Image: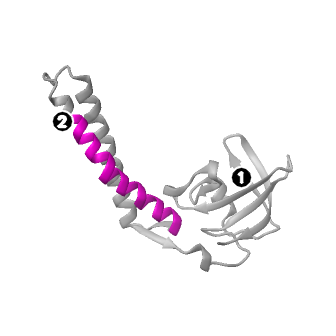
Amino acid sequence: MDKVPMTAGGHAALEVELKHRQQVERPRIIAAISEARAHGDLSENAEYHAAKEQQSLNEGRVAELEDKLSRAEIIDVAKLSGDIVKFGATVTLIDEDTEEERVWQIVGDMEADAKAGRISISSPMARALIGKKSGSSVEVVTPKGARSYEITGVRFG
């Protein structure tokens, strides 16, 4: 069983989602199934089939969350330091073509959210950045083609 690296914040967010799915969504879906059953013939009961589909999706996500949380290796980013990019680092980059500045935190797969500035440790960008120092240039192959960035800052916490 491989450990799943994640930050303490990412671990807490997954626990909140698991609790919500178990204590709120599960009972709501069970009630919807019971109500749909009361409507009679299940073979042509769209509400029943929709509720069973919701139940299947919810239980699948619960199992996935339980698995990831049981294998979690929580890394306390606040205790990390240095100028080399590694898991948990917040990296400031300048696009060498457009001069646009981007800030990314490298986090676990389950907590990645590009809109919030968090990229997965297994993403092409993170893989290109790992092990580099502030001041380095790095080339990343993205879906839009190869891009060059200069690392202008590395911080933790």
Instruction: Residue 120: name its quadrant.
Output: bottom right
Residue, x 60% and y 80% (percent of image)?
79
Q: Secondary structure at mark 1?
A: strand
Against 81, residue 14 (above or below) is above
Residue most extreme to the top = 44
Residue beneath label 2, please? 34
Query: Where in the figure is residue 37, as x and y percent of width and height?
Result: 16, 30
Which mark sits nearer the N-terminus, 1 or 2?
A: 2
Residue, x 73% and y 69% (percent of image)?
154
Instruction: Residue 29: name its quadrant.
Output: top left
Which quadrant holds the C terminus?
A: bottom right
Residue, x 31% and y 37% (percent of image)?
54
Residue beneath label 1, please? 140
Q: Amino acid at mark 2?
A: Ser
Which of the two residues, 34 or 50, is positioned nearer the viewer here? 34
Query: Where in the figure is residue 117, as x and y percent of width and height?
Result: 65, 54
* Residue 7 appearing in the image: no
Is 105 on the left or on the right of 47, as rendered? right
Looking at the rendered structure, the number of numbered marks drawn on it comes to: 2
**What are the residue bounds of the magenta stretch?**
8-34
Which quadrant holds the N terminus?
A: bottom left
Is 36 on the left or on the right of 81, as rendered? left
| Distance from Cα at disc 1 to Cα at disc 2 | 52 Å
Against 4, residue 59 (above or below) is above
Does the magenta segment cover residue 27?
yes
Is 6 on the left or on the right of 144, as rendered? left
